[in-house]
Image: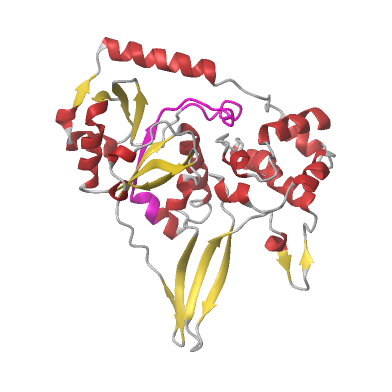
Amino acid sequence: METFTLYREHLGQFLDVCQEQFRVQIPVSAGDGRYRFSPLAGHGVEALALEYHRTLLPPKKYFLLPEETICTFDQKGYHPVEVAEEPFLLFGLHPCDLHGLRIIDQFFSTPYADSAYQSRRKNALIVGLGCLPDDKCFCATMNTQQIMGGYDLFFWDLGERFYIQVGSEAGHGLIHKAREMFHDVVDEDRQDYLETLYQRRHLLTPKVDVADLSQIMEANPDCAVWDELGAACFACGACTMVCPTCTCYDIFDRVELDGSGRRCRQWDSCLFRDFDRIAGEVHFRSDRSDRVKNRFFHKEVVHVKQHQRSACVGCGRCQEACPAGIDVVSVLSRVHASCA
């Protein structure tokens, strides 16, 4: 793996160079200690929030749009909408979000590839950024604190400079767009990088043992914890909207008076009462406790069976967004203790 360093004072210049070819998206402050990914062009490099812990919405918003038109229709039939996505660069994704993208990449590529998602994904460059946890992070519990690829470049903040790992040919191309700004790594850089990893490792400790969680949940699906959570949950769907790996969507038509219209795709949530409604007003999961349980079972049982890993990446967004204050780590701990 190729590695370089970039002095902090040159980061803005590098992003400006990238912006000549790509629509650069960066983490910026949204006020009140919250952050969001937003265009660099609308803010300037001085708005770059390297200190952020998580954004309000995950990077999936760039690939699975909150709402999009998938085809139009009229008296002559249906007309697919082609996705003409310009190349863009997402800067500053933490390891948990890189894992989240890998999970939804898999969902939208197998068994049938989603053309709109794939087109946007193909046109995106990903630049990762090392991070330190806050009280809502539980990536170490879900084993997503480490980087396992999925990036073109990865930046580690060493203070006055960044230690940069190249993860792809496209990342190598980014370096060579401004090669004069980058320096070859020397022993001092490696030592500072290893020291950063050491400090980070001691902050990232698992909060609960989830090694056999899927087996425990599957063996005792009627655990009393789900009824308690059903009583506490508002079924507002906030946790699913901010989750990096939730992919549920609804398809509906917007019809004009002349019979023409658009077929649209919009984010949906398995916690909504009408999510599973079928003909005759029949609901498979009319009780909130069943819907809450279904969401956790999909993350921790079904996805583990299908892909040998949890569909939760430990980013902490759900806990931050939940108006009922439901904490995933506490839920997993209670399920582990109560159902074992």
SS assignment for the magenta stretch, majority: loop
Q: Residue at x 67, y 38 (%)?
A: 300
Q: Look at the picture and state if 170 lies above or below 77.
A: above
Q: Nearer the viewer, residue 91 or 299?
A: 91
Q: Residue at x 64, y 24 (%)?
A: 207
Q: Look at the picture and state if 304 lies above or below 41.
A: above
Q: Is residue 121 left or right of residue 13?
A: right
Q: Residue at x 48, y 41 (%)?
A: 55
Quarter where residue 155 is shown = top left
Q: Look at the picture and state if 151 lies above or below 243.
A: above
**Residue 147 visible:** yes
Q: Quadrant of the C terminus?
A: top right
**Residue 340 visible:** no
Residue 134 part of the magenta segment: yes
Q: Position of residue 67 (x, y in %)?
A: 49, 62
Q: Position of residue 31 (x, y in %)?
A: 46, 43
Q: Look at the picture and state if 338 lies above or below 23.
A: above
Q: Is residue 336 left or right of residue 238?
A: right
Q: Which residues are magenta?
A: 119-146
Q: Residue at x 42, y 52 (%)?
A: 62
Q: Quadrant of the N terminus?
A: top left
